[in-house]
Image (cartoon, rainbow, N blue to C red):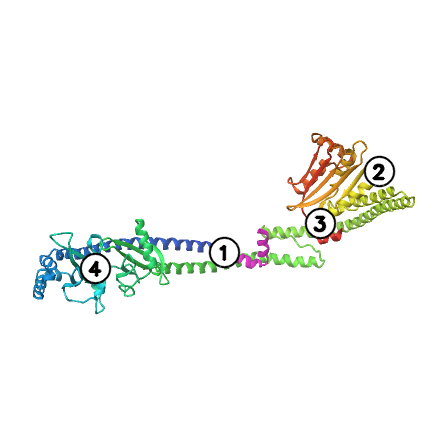
Amino acid sequence: MYKKTSFLLRRLSIKNRLLTAFLITSLLPVAIVAFYSNQIYEASITDKISAYSSQTLTELTRNISRELGQYETLSENIIINDSIQYGLTRYSSLSDFDKNTLQTRIRNELGPQFFSFSNLSNIVIMTNDGETFFDLGYQWYPDNQLSSMVQQTEGAPRNAYWSYLRSNRGSTVIALSRKIYSAENLNLQIGYLVIAMDEKVFARNMFQSVDLGKDSSVYITDRSGVTLSSSSSSLPQGSLNQADLTRRIEAQHEAGRLESFQTKIWSKQYLVSSTFIDAANWYLIGLIPHSYIISELGDLRGNIVLLCLLTLILSSVIGLWIYDSINSPLRSLLRYAKRIHKGRFDPIPKPVAPPDEMQQLTITIHDMVTELKLLIRQVQLEQQAKRDAELKMLQAQINPHFLFNTLNSLKWSAMLSGNESLTQGIGSLSELLRNTILDREELIPLSKEMANLRHYANIQRIRYGDSFELECQPVEPDEDVIVPKFILQPIVENSILHGAANHKRIHICVSFAFRHGHLILTLSDDGKGFDPAELEHKDHAGSRLSGIGIHNVHERIQLHYGAAYGLRTESAPGQGTTTVLTLPLHYVQEEDKAYV
């Protein structure tokens, strides 16, 4: 990898490499420090704004809870009022005159409390059947809204359900709904109370003094995500906004800890802080744009860009200056190298420049040119000696041909005399000598190894006659694989020399198979066998007679392919011997077949 990168850099000129190096080493630290500082600064600002927004929302939650508590206190005073208790319990038996009289009395008794609330919008008292008993009369609300709201009062904590209503004129209110129980029997429900406050006045009183930053917003939602009140007109009452956001806040609340987090809302990044209003079972949510958080980083980033530009200019000037100090002597050396290329070996004077690497290079070239003529003369003498050695080598290669010609002459003489065994033996000896002397390859095709084994058997028949029979599995062209040379001959020789029992003819079989990416060579005979404990002794005998030995074959295989490969021998007295060789499977390629 390092060499490859160096090669790619060499495609650039030294000037460009130096400039690139200076720019990288100067700009990269600045960029890294700037990026790291920017991240740390942004995280610090985010944490501080998050803490500030959480504190602000917590204080705002207290104010909202106090405001809602005042309305709950008002509702309790209304519920226990004697006129209201009397009218609701006897509503069905009252005449219209009595009802009007009661309503006037209620206005007189509770009027001062009603008018002490600046944002009070309406008060509605209903019977259990939904009939209106008292209505302050400021606004009118559709019956379906009121009936839906009083139904939600069932099961509400502290008999107080907070929600919102929309009047017939389109104005929005925040409403409190409560059940009215009889003062004489607290288990007897006699009606419903609905108190409505103007949402716009409520929002102005609560959110006017709250500032979380430019383009930020604060709003109240119920636990289903419906907006009840907001500081921004983009979040109208009754709208369901960012249900996923509400679910995430709900999950934090259930886990017991509300924390600030960042998320994308309306395709923009926001910091979200929230608190829970226990009095109404609401969430108070603050949204702070991420653009506001990082607005103060603009000046810092501008200074960083200016610093990078100054560093870029300074690095370029220094890089060009250093490049000129290297380029000037380097070009002088390049011009002199071109003269040497043209055959002009005039030595250059030794430099008197400062002792840097360029001076050392110039001195080295000076010494090299001084000795170059002597080296050329020496090369000429070596070339002459090389030609003489090649002539002697050719003469040495001619000698084996005389040997092969002589063996061929003996082969023809034996053939003319009718001695077939001698003819085959001399021919096989000639082929074995050719494969040994001329063919220096250590790895050969299996088909060639089988052929060498048959040649060896022909030679042995001259001495042992028909005392053994060799059977070799044919090797098809598509089955030809690569094996080490002469790995079968020592094993067959061991069977011929030591396997015969009582002059009985021994049968030797050589076969092969391919299993799981391996070549399995099996050599078996039906000779007298031997005790495996004497295997090492037998190998030494084979080594003495064959020149290689079974043990040496095992070592050669492991040297070539590793400890996972080799041979194993199984034998027993009177049951013959089987030797199995395991080698990796390497097929003969097309060029190898052409060689064969």
Residue 525 in which image quadrant:
top right
Quickly name the residue at label 3: 479
The answer to which of marks 2 and 3 sits earlier in the sequence is: 2
Judge whether residue 91 is colored magenta: no
Identify which residue, 215 or 25, lies in the foreground.
Answer: 215
The residue stretch that appears in magenta: 1-26
Horizontal side of 51 relative to 373 (left or right) equals left
Q: CA distance from mark 1 to mark 2?
A: 84 Å
Quickly name the residue at label 2: 465
Residue at 25% across, 59% down:
210
The location of residue 363, given as percent across then percent down, is 64, 51
Quickly name the residue at label 1: 24
The location of residue 38, given as percent across then percent down, is 39, 55
The location of residue 549, given as percent across then percent down, is 74, 36
Judge whether residue 4 is colored magenta: yes
Quickly name the residue at label 4: 150
